[in-house]
Amino acid sequence: MLNSNFKHIFLDRDGIINSVVMREDVVGSPRNLQEFEIRDDFVEFYNQISEKNLTLYVVSNQPDIRRGLMQEDTLIEMSNVLLSRFQFAEILYCRHDNSDCCACRKPKPGMLIELLHKFGIEPEDALMVGDSPKDIEAAHAANVKSVLLKTQYNMPYAEAKQPTLIVNSLSELFRSLEQI
Ligand SMILES: [Mg+2]
Ligand SMILES: [Zn+2]
């Protein structure tokens, strides 16, 4: 159960805010602005929580630049689209790939820990929302509670790294937040 009074929501980007892009049955990220589609479910969620005193942040793995599949400018334009429509206190991207062994690529908790430190957030006041076991694992490592959005493409996750809550939609998450 979500039984704390969350003030800060850390959002994964792809699959939560915007749609994922399926390429030959592989789940991927948008690589151009045409592919960057904001999800209706997120817009609804954003409007629903607007009167709550919540601060939103984005923490997103974006290895496609490193892989030569996307331009840095495109990623910045995507952020501009987000900031033109929504209020996010911070948008953090990990631009690395696995081989870089960085501390920020989820499931590592680097981006979450950076937000906790930079904004003086207590881990129990934050909630991570994502659609991947990597999001949930990163939340565990940062001592932050987590919500997994159930999708057709969710990868299996380790028993020990269960999300605090699993929801079928962001409106279901909103209803859970209402109960606290
Ligand atoms: Mg995702
Ligand atoms: Zn990184």
Image: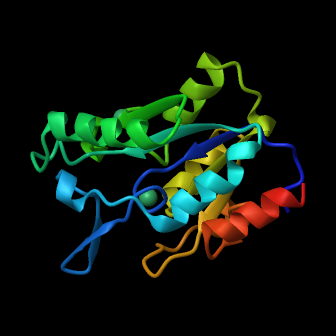
Q: Residue at x 65, y 26 (%)?
A: 116
Which residue in the rendered view is the most extreme toward the left?
68
Residue 131 image point, x, y percent: 51, 63
Q: Is residue 39 above or below residue 119?
A: below
Report ligand 1 position as a quadrant: bottom left
Residue 42 seen anywhere in this rendered image of the structure: yes
- 180 relative to 118 in the view: left or right: right
Q: Is residue 101 above or below residue 4?
A: above
- 23 relative to 48 in the view: left or right: left
- Relative depth, front residue between 9 and 115: 9
- Relative depth, front residue between 53 and 176: 53
Q: Quadrant of the N terminus?
A: bottom right
Q: Quadrant of the C terminus?
A: bottom right
Residue 35 image point, x, y percent: 22, 61
Residue 109 image point, x, y percent: 54, 38
- Relative depth, front residue between 118 and 106: 118
